Image (cartoon, rainbow, N blue to C red):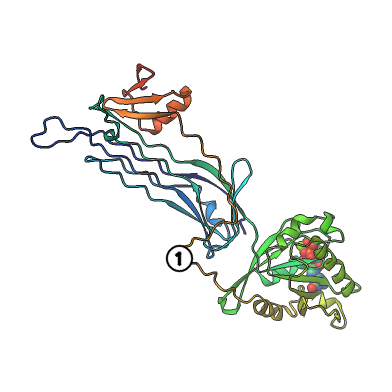
């Protein structure tokens, strides 16, 4: 089965806590504060990996989390940053947020995007020393990292796409040449959603992907039949396999019908190279003739998906027509960018922080709603019995 959708929960690392520490030196009875800052939490980074074909890995994998930052240390020592967590997805994957917005489109090999940022580390008590407060017995806790639910959607990036009128035998052909097992039946619009298959070259030296889309009819470019949505899937294919039922009437006329729809749709489809596949050879006494001369028609195949006649030649031809692409060169110092990325507005720097004290925690600034505060304290590591100072009051954490 081909998986083109998955859901995943991503959590960036929490920042490390600042340290509460005082200098200890010989001859200095009361050293000043020297607690260092915590390190930043790791980010969650999504990378488009050309070695992956679909999202099946995410059937098992439900979440990904980056590492926490290390706490600060004595002598103003900074905590180490948490490691990033990498999430590899196939090229062509779009990341969709909980509101259904596409936040990133990873359409090129190596494209990468930071989808969840790690939290900042907390400041150590050394940073809180002032002339009037020489013994700060508190330090900031680290901030939590971004946490979000993502939907991954793979927009089909096929080498070739099957196009043609309903019932032409597109799904039968895909079943013949690939590992896919699409539904085949003797009525139009059997295929209702795109199906992707992988075709192995003899000796498994190469693979190609071929997508089968619902049949096109006159007016498809304006939404007739199953409409444009499926024409859009043809857009990312390098080659169109234009399948025609040669047992029924005039093949050339039917070629023109579909070609007019491709032209009306535009989006580059009107220029895309095509191979014409005259199918259902077994129903004809003589191999069909096809006289249209057009520079976009790179090859004409005569096959029967039913008997298998001509199928080997079609497969061989496919590998010739879809020559391996040059691996896109990755300039080492220049990371490829995602096609587009919508940054989620960062929450305004919060008006409060949680400080760690000798006996528990102190909430500095304007305290938030109780639920939010509770969650933040829990995440900061509050335990039963810890003291929590909020707005001049001291409570005990339950
Ligand atoms: N005799 C014969 N029948 C075929 C051949 N190829 C397909 N068929 C039959 O034609 C009918 C339609 O085949 P499909 O593969 O479902 O056609 P399709 O183009 O995918 O149709 P839609 O999904 O509706 O667009 C089925 O009954 C197939 O068994 C062939 O080479 N010879
Ligand atoms: Mg079909």
Name above or below for residue 30 compared with residue 264: above
Residue at the limit of the structure toward the bottom, as seen here:
286
Q: Quadrant of residue 391?
A: top left
Where the C terminus falls, by quadrant? top left
Q: Quadrant of residue 109?
A: bottom right
Decide if residue 228 is in sight here: yes
Where the N terminus falls, by quadrant? bottom right
Q: Residue at the location (35% across, 34% down)?
A: 141
Quadrant containing ligand 2: bottom right
Horizontally, residue 12 falls left or right of residue 168, namely: left
Secondary structure type for disc 1: loop
Q: Residue at the location (84% across, 82% down)?
A: 287
> Count of labels shown?
1
Residue at the limit of the structure toward the front, as seen here:
131
Pointer 1: residues within 10 angstroms few (<14), some, or many (20+)? few
Name above or below for residue 156 compared with residue 139: below
Decide if residue 166 is in sight here: no
Q: Residue at the location (26% across, 24% down)?
A: 132
Q: Position of residue 272 (x, y in %)?
A: 74, 70
Horizontally, residue 284 falls left or right of residue 343, namely: right
Residue at the limit of the structure toward the top, as seen here:
393
Q: Within 8 Å: ligand 2 and the Cβ of disc 1? A: no
Q: Position of residue 256 (x, y in %)?
A: 86, 70
Q: Residue at the location (65% across, 60% down)?
A: 156
Q: Position of residue 28 (x, y in %)?
A: 11, 33
Q: Which residue is mark 1?
A: 332
Horizontally, residue 348 falls left or right of residue 17, namely: right
Q: Position of residue 160 (x, y in %)?
A: 69, 69
Instruction: Tell which of 152 and 167 is nearer to you.
Output: 152
Residue at the limit of the structure toward the right, as seen here:
249
Name above or below for residue 112 compared with residue 167: above
């Amino acid at each position: 089965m081909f998986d083109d959708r998955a859901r995943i929960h991503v959590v960036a690392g929490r920042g490390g806590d600042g340290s509460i520490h005082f200098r200890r030196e010989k001859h200095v009875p009361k050293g000043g504060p020297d607690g260092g800052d915590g390190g930043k939490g790791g980010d969650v980074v999504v990378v488009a990996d050309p070695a992956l074909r679909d999202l099946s890995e995410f059937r098992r994998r439900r979440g990904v989390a980056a590492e926490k930052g290390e706490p600060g240390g004595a002598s103003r020592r900074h905590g180490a940053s948490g490691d990033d967590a990498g999430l590899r997805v196939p090229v062509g994957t779009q990341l969709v947020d909980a509101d259904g917005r596409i936040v990133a489109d990873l359409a090129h090999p190596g494209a990468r995007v930071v989808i969840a940022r790690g939290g900042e580390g907390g400041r150590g008590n050394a940073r809180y020393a002032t002339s009037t407060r020489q013994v700060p017995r508190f330090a900031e806790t680290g901030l939590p990292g971004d946490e979000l639910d993502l939907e991954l959607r793979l927009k089909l990036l096929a080498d070739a796409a099957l196009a043609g009128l309903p019932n032409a035998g597109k799904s039968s052909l895909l079943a013949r040449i690939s590992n896919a097992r699409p539904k085949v039946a003797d009525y139009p619009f059997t295929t209702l959603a795109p199906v992707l298959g992988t075709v192995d070259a003899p000796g498994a030296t190469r693979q190609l992907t071929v997508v089968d889309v619902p049949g096109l009819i006159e007016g498809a470019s304006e939404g007739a039949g199953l409409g444009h949505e499926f024409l859009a899937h043809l857009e990312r294919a390098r080659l169109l396999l234009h399948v025609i039922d040669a047992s029924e009437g005039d093949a050339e006329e039917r070629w023109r019908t579909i070609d007019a729809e491709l032209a009306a749709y535009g989006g580059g489809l009107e220029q895309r190279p095509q191979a014409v596949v005259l199918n259902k050879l077994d129903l004809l006494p003589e191999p069909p003739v096809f006289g249209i001369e057009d520079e976009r028609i790179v090859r004409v195949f005569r096959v029967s998906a039913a008997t298998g006649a001509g199928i080997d030649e079609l497969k061989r031809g496919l590998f010739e027509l879809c020559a391996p692409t040059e691996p896109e060169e990755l300039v080492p110092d220049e990371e490829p960018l995602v096609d587009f990325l919508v940054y989620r507005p960062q929450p305004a720097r919060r008006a409060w922080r949680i400080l760690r004290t000798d006996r528990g925690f102190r909430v500095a600034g304007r305290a938030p709603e109780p639920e939010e505060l509770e969650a933040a304290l829990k995440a900061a590591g509050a335990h039963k019995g810890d003291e929590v100072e909020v707005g001049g009051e001291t409570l005990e954490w339950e």
